[in-house]
């Protein structure tokens, strides 16, 4: 029998009644900088700069006016005659700006004399590479420039999805589209790229594949590993920095973008998960070699024992800093920080992990990160958290993506090696085309048959325990717990969610519960909670709610250092295949929150949980999330066994009966 704190409240009882009824940034501790000559002056003070700004407004503009807000920021900057901004705006159903129309492409020039309309352009698709190529050609034909910068503005979705999701056409620019458009206008050069910097004011684009795609086109890349908050880049600040010192290098410009961005996030209270980095794209040959060798060692190890290797790699990927949520509720974008993954994988990939970390450190010349994104090193890579159900096919179509990693994850997803992988293992040179298609008969590498409804024992201390053998652990990337509330009187089971709060020993195979009869509650209200990220210093949770009537997922962090939760904000729900929601909504006093929970009847034939709206409350001065006593009653607890390909089963259920400050553990009758 377990003992718990007294003072059990009646919160759950009330809940059941409701549901039944219805600026020296260089010293910033959050900044990482490589002290080298990247930041030395790169030009003469009188050199001309041309900044191409490709503004695909999408729903960020039609819903929030975010593009118009950034254009207004630009108009507040002071730039000299030798710095000009060439703008193309479109891709939105509605524009908040009075001078931009939704039924055409809008082309403007901003210079020291203000904003000038250049062309009355016909309508066009911002997600079409021909539109991008035409804009590039127009800039090259009409404006001399000693230094060129290109900025993509809109949604981003990482290596597979790409950037610039046109709201009207629902098309986006994939990496191949971007490369073909630039190659049609400019001659790529490793030693003298045509662009000083190419940047992405968009989510999830600071990846190996994006940087590799730009090799020969630009000296530097600036982008974010994580989903960007709605405030985005701070255009007044970094344009003023360039105006004050047009001699700066692309790296120095990227640093100015990072520093002003982070300052803007702090002013908007969105810095917690902010990331932005500056990558020296001319270092890609060394990084490409290190990444390919890392993947090749992984492919070799997987060929020897695929279940064991992929389960271990999956555990490292789960713990490594990853981006975009990677859950059913938030969508899967399959992006992981490469250096963090490599560092955690040294035990299974000892020959190549450190070389990859070194190459990343050499390529990333500057980065900023918020307090809950401290493990990121500035460059992410693809990892199929969803088991290949979403973006894997798109990823394999991108020429800049690593052939060996395409083969590695194909093997993990489909259970068979493509011919290209066999050639690589036989000593073929890394490179060439990837032609593999989904096999007619995929092989399931991971077998959960003997873990489904696995018996749970009760030890002498009243803890629920499962013991796994080595073969069973070789099927798994993680073990979570699931909790339900059982109310026979009202014939209902409430699914409260999942957590990683399991006492796990992967060496012995012993997994114990850590149930204390508490659960995370929102301002004292019972909610469904799902763990989405397991880091060394913090966990991140998703809580489905309705915020002022809109379906959202609340983002909540539990900080192990402070032993407290923090509500970061909310993001609206997205459909599968859509870009990540960039607008992190900060919760403010007066907001209306409707709590949600999943429920099903105990009796009858319906075995599916259904989401219910429970109660609506008004936020006061501060929204709190805390572990609070659940209340007396009967709770069902299961271990959830999760495979690297995102399948899972649960153990048999154990009952925890809570009464008068004590927990009694028993088998379900």
Image (cartoon, rainbow, N blue to C red):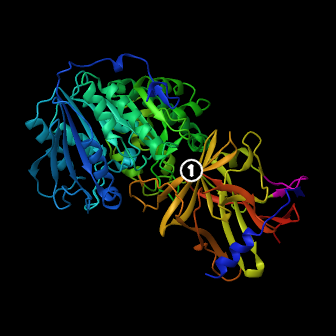
Percent from the top left, x then y, of residue 190? 25, 24
- The residue depicted at 70 percent of the width and 44 percent of the height is 563
Q: Relative to 271, does residue 49 appear above or below in the rendering?
A: above
In this view of the protein, which residue sits in the foreground, 623 or 180? 623
- 368 falls in the magenta region: no
Mark 1 lies on residue:
445
Q: Relative to 225, does residue 253 appear above or below in the rendering?
A: above
Magenta residues, start to end:
457-466
Q: Quadrant of residue 261?
A: top left
In this view of the protein, which residue sits in the foreground, 524 or 498? 524
Percent from the top left, x then y, of residue 497? 65, 61
Q: In which quarter of the image is residue 141?
A: top left
- The residue depicted at 71 percent of the width and 74 percent of the height is 14
- Taking the image as shown, residue 72 lies to the left or right of residue 500, namely left
- 465 falls in the magenta region: yes
Q: Relative to 474, does residue 291 appear above or below in the rendering?
A: above
Quarter of the image for the C terminus: give it: bottom right
- Taking the image as shown, residue 606 lies to the left or right of residue 85, namely right
| SS for dot 1 | loop
Q: Relative to 173, does residue 34 appear above or below in the rendering?
A: above
Percent from the top left, x then y, of residue 101? 18, 59
């Amino acid at each position: 029998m377990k003992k718990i704190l007294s003072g059990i409240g009646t919160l759950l009882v009330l809940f059941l009644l409701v549901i039944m009824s219805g600026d020296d940034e260089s010293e910033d501790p959050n900044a990482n900088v490589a002290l080298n000559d990247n930041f030395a002056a790169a030009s003469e003070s009188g050199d001309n700069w041309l900044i191409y700004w490709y503004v695909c407004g999408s729903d960020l503009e039609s819903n929030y006016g975010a593009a118009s807000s950034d254009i207004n920021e630009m108009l507040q900057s002071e730039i000299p005659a030798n710095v000009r901004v060439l703008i193309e705006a479109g891709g939105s159903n509605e524009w908040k700006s009075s001078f931009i129309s939704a039924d055409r492409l809008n082309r403007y020039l901003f210079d020291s004399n203000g904003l000038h309309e250049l062309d009355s352009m016909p309508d066009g698709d911002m997600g079409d590479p021909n539109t991008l190529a035409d804009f590039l050609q127009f800039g090259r034909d009409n404006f001399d420039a000693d230094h060129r910068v290109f900025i993509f503005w809109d949604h981003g979705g990482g290596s597979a999805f790409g950037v610039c999701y046109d709201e009207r056409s629902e098309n986006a620019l994939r990496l191949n589209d971007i490369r073909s458009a630039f190659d049609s206008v400019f001659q790529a050069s490793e030693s003298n790229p045509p662009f000083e910097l190419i940047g992405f004011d968009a989510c999830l684009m600071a990846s190996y594949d994006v940087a590799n795609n730009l090799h020969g086109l630009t000296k530097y890349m600036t982008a974010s590993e994580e989903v960007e908050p709605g405030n985005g880049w701070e255009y007044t600040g970094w344009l003023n920095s360039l105006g004050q010192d047009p001699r700066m290098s692309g790296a120095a410009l990227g640093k100015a973008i990072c520093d002003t961005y982070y300052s803007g996030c702090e002013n908007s209270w969105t810095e917690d998960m902010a990331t932005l980095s500056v990558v020296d794209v001319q270092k890609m040959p060394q990084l490409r070699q290190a990444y390919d060798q890392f993947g090749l060692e992984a492919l070799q190890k997987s060929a020897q024992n695929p279940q064991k290797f992929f389960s271990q790699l999956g555990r490292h990927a789960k713990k490594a800093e990853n981006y975009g949520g990677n859950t059913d509720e938030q969508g899967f974008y399959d992006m992981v920080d490469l250096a963090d993954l490599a560092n955690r994988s040294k035990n299974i990939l000892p020959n190549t992990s450190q070389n990859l970390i070194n190459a990343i450190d050499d390529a990333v010349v500057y980065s900023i990160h918020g307090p809950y994104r401290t493990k990121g090193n500035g460059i992410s890579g693809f990892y199929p958290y969803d088991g290949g159900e979403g973006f894997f096919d798109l990823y394999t179509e991108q020429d800049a993506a690593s052939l060996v990693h395409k083969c590695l994850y194909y093997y993990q997803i489909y259970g068979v090696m493509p011919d290209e992988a066999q050639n690589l293992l036989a000593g073929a040179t890394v490179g060439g085309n990837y032609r593999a298609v989904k096999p007619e008969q995929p092989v399931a590498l991971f077998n959960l048959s003997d873990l489904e409804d696995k018996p749970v024992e009760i030890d002498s201390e009243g803890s629920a325990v499962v013991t796994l053998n080595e073969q069973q652990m070789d099927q798994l990337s993680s073990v979570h717990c699931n909790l339900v509330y059982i109310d026979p009187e009202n014939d209902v089971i409430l699914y409260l969610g999942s957590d990683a709060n399991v006492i796990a020993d992967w060496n012995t195979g012993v997994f114990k519960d850590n149930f204390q009869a508490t659960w995370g509650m929102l301002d004292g209200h019972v909610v469904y909670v799902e763990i989405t990220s397991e880091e060394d210093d913090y966990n991140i949770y998703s809580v489905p709610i309705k915020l002022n009537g809109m379906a959202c997922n609340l983002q909540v962090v539990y900080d192990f250092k402070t032993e407290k939760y923090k509500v970061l904000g909310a993001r609206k729900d997205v459909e599968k295949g859509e870009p990540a929601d960039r607008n992190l909504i900060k919760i403010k006093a007066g907001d209306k929150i409707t709590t949600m929970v999943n429920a099903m009847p105990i009796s009858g034939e319906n075995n599916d949980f259904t989401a219910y709206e429970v109660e609506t409350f008004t936020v006061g001065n501060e929204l709190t999330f805390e572990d609070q006593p659940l209340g007396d009653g009967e709770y069902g607890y299961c271990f959830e066994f999760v495979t690297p390909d995102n399948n899972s089963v649960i153990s048999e259920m154990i009952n925890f009966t809570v009464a008068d400050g004590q927990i009694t553990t028993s088998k379900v009758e």
